[in-house]
Image (cartoon, grey):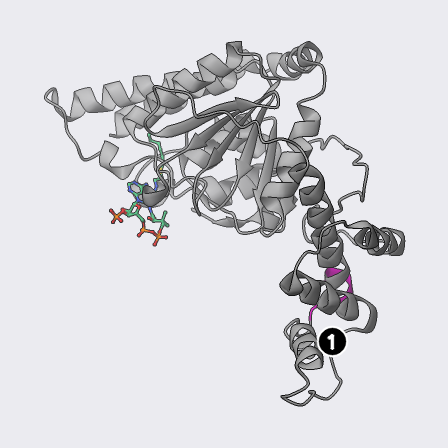
Amino acid sequence: MNRTVHAVRFPVIQLHTTGATMRVSQEVFEKAKDQLKLLKEDPGNEVKLKLYALFKQATEGPCSSPKPGMLDFVKKAKWDAWSSLGSLSKDNARQKYVDLVSSLVSSESSSQVKDTTPDSKHGYETLQVTTTDNITKIMLNRPEKKNAITTQMYREIIQALEEAAKDDSVITVITGNGDYYCSGNDLNNFTNIPAGGIEKMAKDGAVLLENFVKHFIDFPKPLIAVVNGPAVGISVTLLGLFDIVYATDRATFHTPFSELGQSPEGCSSYMFPKIMGLSKANEMLLFNKKLTAGEAYAQGLVTEVFPDWTFEKEVWIRLKAYANLPKNSLALSKQLIRGVEKEKLHAVNCQECELLRERD
Ligand SMILES: CCC/C=C/C(=O)SCCNC(=O)CCNC(=O)[C@H](O)C(C)(C)COP(=O)([O-])OP(=O)([O-])OC[C@H]1O[C@@H](n2cnc3c(N)ncnc32)[C@H](O)[C@@H]1OP(=O)([O-])[O-]
């Protein structure tokens, strides 16, 4: 089952960055060329060189002209930029050219909008939670630990989801700070044995985990994962409970449960086979197969993959457009889509947590 991607039309170039396979049409390429002429701000020499190189590669293929002399600075810089693209195909160069122009046009228009990002909400130590432009953004904020989820972070995410469910926002986004989306359960959660011993730790852990996952199952508004880097463990298994998953092409998806002597959670034992088919789900959940972003897209776990260099810009422009849609209509439609499965998901969550408790 592939996820549905809602098409949003931008006033400028339509973005075609769905995975690595889609081709940019000549028409889109020409449009990008025209848009470039309308930029008001000079993007700077580095970007201009990149644009030049991509354009040459897209129209003529790899650079085969002789290297200009050392003193011919401009020609040499252009030649270097073009040559650096090596054997990049014309199609890929066209795609990258269009992506780059899109990001320049977008950043120019968004720089004209007043920055109204409010301060992070108080009371969170492991998260940064903000609401702006009708979007509540829950950012995992332990970049130095690759955003590993401690028991405190589990509790804070639960609290943030409860608040986001009730606030004025239209959509809710979860993302990570730094180079990782999330490295999964903090492994120290298993090593700090409390006074009641291992059995109590396992029981408390299972109760917390079940409640945590329950908040994703029951979340009433569209929930979007902005996967800004590699994702591990529970941050991957939960993705089946999000309504949309956008990923940078730098992201990977890894569920090393068998390696750790654990079993799947986050309703992945039910959602992954449903999303990607049984055998692909088994490769991930039983045999620890790490997926690239492209593979995760091909298997329907990810809605769309964006080049890392334009990821944040493109995704947030799109999300802001989504967040202007009518709040109630979105919430009701989501509940209609998810409602059919809710009972089943709660039962799966309960079983998964019970198994984890027994195995600890
Ligand atoms: C409830 C049960 C269900 C849940 C299931 C799961 O999620 S299962 C999945 C469970 N997850 C895993 O099995 C993933 C375990 N982690 C890894 O495999 C690697 O750290 C990495 C591949 C995520 C990043 O490799 P890299 O070479 O790029 O970076 P680096 O290694 O140098 O890490 C930087 C710092 O972050 C720290 N830190 C990172 N992750 C965790 C963590 N989960 N925990 C604690 N700490 C973590 C790391 O110790 C280091 O701290 P230090 O020494 O600076 O104080």
Residue 330 vertical placement versus 285 (above, below): above
* Residue beneath the point at 44% across and 35% down: 235
Q: Position of residue 59 (x, y in %)?
A: 83, 68
Q: Is residue 172 above or below residue 331?
A: below
Residue furthest right as drawn: 27
Residue 89 on the magenta span: yes
State the image coordinates of residue 312 (x, y, percent, origin top left). 58, 42
Q: Is residue 154 left or right of residue 46?
A: left
Ligand 1 is in which quadrant of the figure?
top left
Quadrant for the N terminus, please: top right
Q: Secondary structure at mark 1?
A: loop
Above or below for 34 versus 275 = below
Is residue 108 found left or right of 151 in the rendered image?
Answer: right
Location of residue 78 in the rendering, given as x and y in whole percent from the top left corner: 70, 75
Looking at the rendered structure, the kind of residue marked 1 is Pro
The quadrant holding residue 126 is top left
Is label 1 within 8 A of ligand 1 (CB to nearest ligand atom)? Answer: no
Circle 1 sits on which residue?
62
In which image quadrant can residue 85 be found? bottom right
Foreground pick, 122 / 45:
45
Judge from the rendering whether residue 66 lies leftward or rightward of residue 138; answer left or right: right
Image quadrant for the C terminus? top left
x, y percent for residue 144: 33, 44
- In the figure, 262 relative to 61: above or below? above
The answer to which of 28 and 334 lies nearer the viewer is: 28
Residue stretch rendered in magenta on the structure:
88-92
Location of residue 43 by image quarter: bottom right
**Magenta stretch prevailing secondary structure:** helix
